[in-house]
Amino acid sequence: MDAIERLIAEDPGQRGVAALAIAGDLGRAAASLVKAKRVLLLSGFHIPRAGAAETDGPPGAWDLANALNDLGASVSTATDSVCWRVFEGMGFAPLLPAEEAAARANEFDHVVAIERPGRAADGRSYTMNATPIPDVFPFDDLVAQCRMFGVSTIAIGDGGNEIGMGKASAAALRSIPRGETIASVTKTDHLIVGGTSNWGAWGLIAALSMIARKNLLPSEDAARATLERAVSAGAVDGVTALREPTVDGLTWPVHASMLRRLTDLVAAALADHA
Ligand code: ZN
Ligand code: ZN
């Protein structure tokens, strides 16, 4: 588990992600999620200057939904109207409008937010460049309610401005660029931090694989096809704002290498206990 945590916190964007991570939360999140029956995934990060959702988030959500289905859980995904087109185009089903998911939050035993804008101290949500995100649905309230009702909440992020980052250290959040403005105050029970949020999702799947004793990670071809499908559905790179199959400005070989190394870690762990 520690090896996975270290690997996914590789920081090609030099955002200081390792300092945001909570040591041990990946294992704790996986230990809880492996027993899930009904899971709600929240994802979709709107990039205002492109008018579209970014490529970080939806592919990770897709792969996590598949892994959880494989473990016998039923999985619903929710996003808001500004990101809807990408999730619908990728084929997420069931896909819930944000308002409906919020009204039905008590039907789930786990909620996982993956690269989802989180409320900052001033009540707004921001991009990494400190641009306010218009028309963002505040899943923060749903997450807070779930925590009150005992629904287990997990968040995956890579920048400090996402739901869940309220759990990161105040000093680490202050040290990210424009941290005083963009850092999210919304907490979850567990926080997973990756160099990209898709890596965080893969890290969580790798941890689930070790606990469940079977590899639940996507193949390299499947993962690449999922990213291509996100782009075909209108997703853009969150850093370049271009409609290309890159994530946070990183080309596919960088992501393929991360997936390969996680797959190797899972294979080694399963072989150890065979
Ligand atoms: Zn992010
Ligand atoms: Zn990202």
Image (spheres, grey):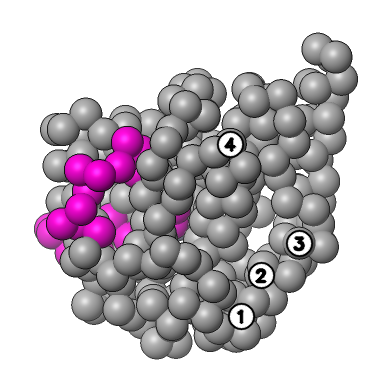
Give the magenta-colored segment's residue range: 101-125
Taking depth in this image into account, of 207 and 15 the one nearest to the observer is 207
In the rendered structure, the answer to whether residue 131 lies left or right of residue 7 reads: left
Q: Quadrant of residue 106?
A: top left
Label 2 or label 3, whichever lies nearer to me, is: 3
For image coordinates 47% across by 27% down, the residue present is: 35
Cβ of mark 1 under 8 Å from ligand 2: the answer is no
Q: Amino acid at mark 1?
A: Val
Q: Quadrant of residue 119?
A: bottom left
Quadrant assignment for the N terminus: top right
For image coordinates 38% across by 77% down, the residue present is: 84
User: Label 1, on which residue?
Assistant: 231
For image coordinates 43% across by 33% down, the residue present is: 36
- Mark 2 → mark 1, Cα distance in angstroms: 6 Å
Q: Is residue 160 visible?
A: no
Q: Amino acid at mark 2?
A: Leu
User: Label 2, on which residue?
Assistant: 227
Residue 3 versus residue 88 in the image, above or below: above
Residue 97 versus residue 198 in the image, above or below: below
Q: Amino acid at mark 3?
A: Ala
Residue 3, how many percent across, how many down?
A: 69, 26
User: Label 4, on which residue?
Assistant: 71
**How many badges with numbers are in the image?**
4
User: Label 3, on which residue?
Assistant: 222
Dot 2 crowding, Cα within 10 Å, few <14, some 14–19, many 20+: many
